[in-house]
Amino acid sequence: MSTESDELRFTDLGLAPELLKAVQDLGYETPTPIQAGAIPPLLEGRDMIGQAQTGTGKTAAFALPLLQRLDLERRDVQAVVLTPTRELAMQVATAVRSYGKHVGKHGVRVLPVYGGQPIHIQRKALQGTVHVVIGTPGRVTDHLKRGTLDLAGVHFFCLDEADEMLNMGFLEDVEWILDHAPKERQIALFSATMPSPIRRIATKHLNDPADVKFEQKTKTVQSIEQASIRVSRHNKNEALERILGVEDHEAVLIFVGTQRMAAELAEHLSSRGFGADCMHGGMNQAQRDHVVKRLRGRQIQLVVATDVAARGLDIDHIGLVVNYDLPRDPEVYVHRVGRTGRAGRAGRAVSLWQPREQGLLRSIERFSGQRMEDMRIPGVEELLARRRMRIRDQLISLAGEIPADFVAWVKEITEETDLEGDALTAAALKLAWGEGPLSAPAEPKGKGQANDHYDPVDRVEIVLPIGAQDRVRPGAIVGAIAGESGLPGKVVGKINMRERVTFVEVPAAQAERIIKALTGVRIGGRVVKPRLAHPEGAGGGYSKPRQHGPRGSSRGPKKGPPRGFRRR
């Protein structure tokens, strides 16, 4: 069913006075649509399926009815909430305590249980009074099998973010827990999506559930600036380094698609001087907790993570999210970028995409309801300018706090060496700057062109109708490009030479100039007529060359431009 909450207030939902007081303390006046739709049937004791995205207020939607139905005179566990991650379990536990702080004389006893924390600590806590257990399916299953958690008194179960538990492989544990639950129980199932395995669990374990759906009109926070950069596969690392070089943020999350990439990219960034660590599902909970603790404590600035960090990670000072790999599911994108812009702060998200991923990029934009700003790779001069500005700001901030002995030292050096103050200051700046130029060198001007520039990151491929059969060396191609276009040979990127054709990476900004300069030029004894390998720009691609000759054979050389290349 669909619900509208514009005219409703929490006082209209049948909540107990102590819960209304807690809600009022938190500054809430009107319920969100998912809260308005879910709270009444849950208070009636009905099972419920709630479909809503992160950020819609679904924690209160199940926590408030859960709290109202507790009997605090009892000491046993009466409610169990299952979450996919330790981070989300801790977040939900904090929320339940906040909503229940006025319930009973001493409040509600809530215990989060999860892997990574020694199980004997949780076992000892379960021997005392615990009303609500909130935990990951794996750790809850462990406690049940050890006999340290008893479900006999549990009358309320909540499956929070059930689709994510499916994605993380927890569904078997969830079913096992529900199979061992009392027959008379109430179940609330919340999920952003409803794939068939989740529907099957609902059909099997829920009894005539209320169906509450809420689609966010805008699925990403408006305060989050979202941008996208088109890059080639070979240049993603350099593009990422340039982004990090010009963006100033206290903490950055970088999302990748695989555990291996998370580890390798974190190691690469660390080798380039960035304080980076990784977090992925292959790490145990204690290792992931350690990374989160370091990020929260500002001991590191960058974390390269898989989607294990896309939900439940709540660190206020994360100012930038970078999608190094685009997620295949647009909903995951929403969860990823939601890690920034927390606690009312402004946030920024930058996504790297390859030409073949243009369709995926557009589907993410349609789903999120926001178009990403087209952004180009920061140039070398921008990087150097940003570094100069950082050093300048540091100098200005230190200028008013320099100890007297440093001032005396400067006077001593100037008197001993007869150096002027400007020369000494410049020498100190050079010492702080280190190796490398202070500014980017001026780009060479080509034939008849002025103010040309190129970006060695944003590249395209051109096709030359010569290959290995023509006995042409890559050096000859580089020499021809440099000699005819007037550009330095270093602008040439990867050269992929095949039997009859050669693909050459060149700066996108200079591709047309290079093609024009090489047209009609003889390389390796053949006159060439180059063209773009991906004339469509984004989203294009080239297919493998067809074999020439009868029935696809490749007998005998063919003259003229290669056949068989087509745009997809």
Image (tube, rainbow, N blue to C red):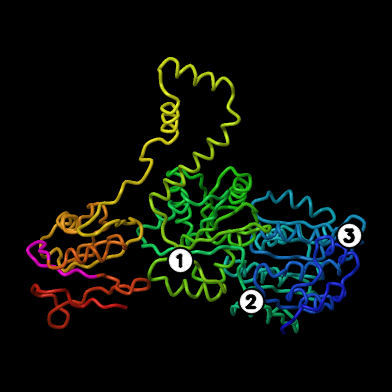
Query: Mark 3–mark 2 contact, CB under 8 Å?
Result: no
Q: Residues within 10 Å of mark 1 (few under 14, many from 20)?
A: few
Q: CA distance from mark 1 to mark 2?
A: 23 Å
Furthest toward the top, the residue is: 416
Query: Which residue position holds label 3?
Result: 102
What segment carries the magenta color? 521-531
Question: Which of marks 2 and 3 precedes in the sequence?
Answer: 3
Q: Amino acid at mark 3?
A: His
Question: Which of marks 1 and 3 precedes in the sequence?
Answer: 3
**Within the magenta stretch, is there residue 149?**
no
Residue 374 is labelled as 1
Q: Residue at x 20, y 65 (%)?
A: 502
Query: Which residue position holds label 2?
Result: 217
Q: Amino acid at mark 2?
A: Lys
Point out the frontmost of discs 3 and 1: 1
Question: Which of marks 2 and 1 precedes in the sequence?
Answer: 2
Point out the frontmost of discs 3 and 2: 2
Q: Amino acid at mark 1?
A: Asp
Query: Mark 3–mark 1 contact, CB under 8 Å?
Result: no
